[in-house]
Image (cartoon, grey):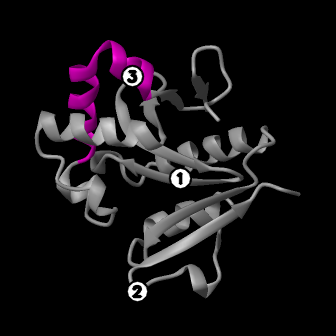
Amino acid sequence: MAISNVNGEVKSSRLILTLARPQYDEHPDAVAQKIQQVLQPQTCVALPQSWQNINTLADAHRWLRTQLLEAQIYMVVHRTTSELLGVAVVHEQGEEAYIGYVIAKEHWGKGYASEALQTLVACYKEQATVKTLWAGVSKDNISSIKVLTKSGFELANSEHQDLDTRHYVLSLEN
């Protein structure tokens, strides 16, 4: 489910979430450079291995191409400054979708992750296909756990856990 808007974007009070694919198709190097700035090593330390070691423009291109094969990437942009603050990636699999997100370190603690996630959740609540949202988080990433719980996610039962990752779930069915 792409965000249902003519321009492939949705707005919140401070953010615009816009699909990365059209921008990447039109200006690949510019988008890859922005992604490289967001996916800095200190920002991605608690993220999956595929999100780490984005050190060069070629790495950013490789990450974008890989993600775009399997998922939708949303660029999280500040509504007034147009600065890229982070990215959200959504992998849909039937009635479930898996959401990952990262906000550039210099923008941590400003509520952007919560606002972006809550905006995506609201979009998914307006559609009928996906019934459940999932997110994984490092057990030590307390800030991201707070973002998830603030957005309505609950800790999944223990069969979905491993040593380092906690999985959170949000049912979209009322």
Secondary structure category for the residue under label 2: loop
Q: Is residue 109 magenta?
A: no
Image position of 73 with respect to 141: above or below: above
Q: Residues within 10 Å of mark 1 (few under 14, many from 20)?
A: many
Q: Earlier in the sequence, mark 3 or mark 2?
A: 3
Which circle marks residue 99 in the picture? Answer: 1
Image position of 31 with respect to 165: above or below: above
Q: Quadrant of the N terminus?
A: top right
- Picture coordinates of residue 20, whole percent (x, y): 42, 27
Of labels 3 and 2, the one closer to you: 2
Is 60 displayed left or right of 152 in the figure?
Answer: left
At label 1, the amino acid type is Ile
Which circle marks residue 117 in the picture? Answer: none
* Residue at left offset 12%, top offset 46%: 55
* Residue at left offset 57%, top offset 21%: 8
Of 103 and 136, which appears nearest the observer? 136
Q: Quadrant of the C terminus?
A: bottom right
Of 27 and 37, which appears nearest the observer? 27
Q: Residues within 10 Å of mark 2 (few under 14, many from 20)?
A: few
Q: Which residue is mark 3?
A: 81
**Most common SS among magenta residues:** helix
Secondary structure category for the residue under label 1: strand
Q: Which residue is mark 2?
A: 163
Residue range highlighted in magenta: 20-39
At label 2, the amino acid type is Leu
Measure the C-alpha gap from mark 2 to mark 1: 20 Å
Check whether the beta carbons of the residues at disc 2 and disc 1 lie within 8 A of each other. no
Q: Earlier in the sequence, mark 2 or mark 1?
A: 1
- Picture coordinates of residue 44, whole percent (x, y): 28, 57
* Residue at left offset 67%, top offset 47%: 121
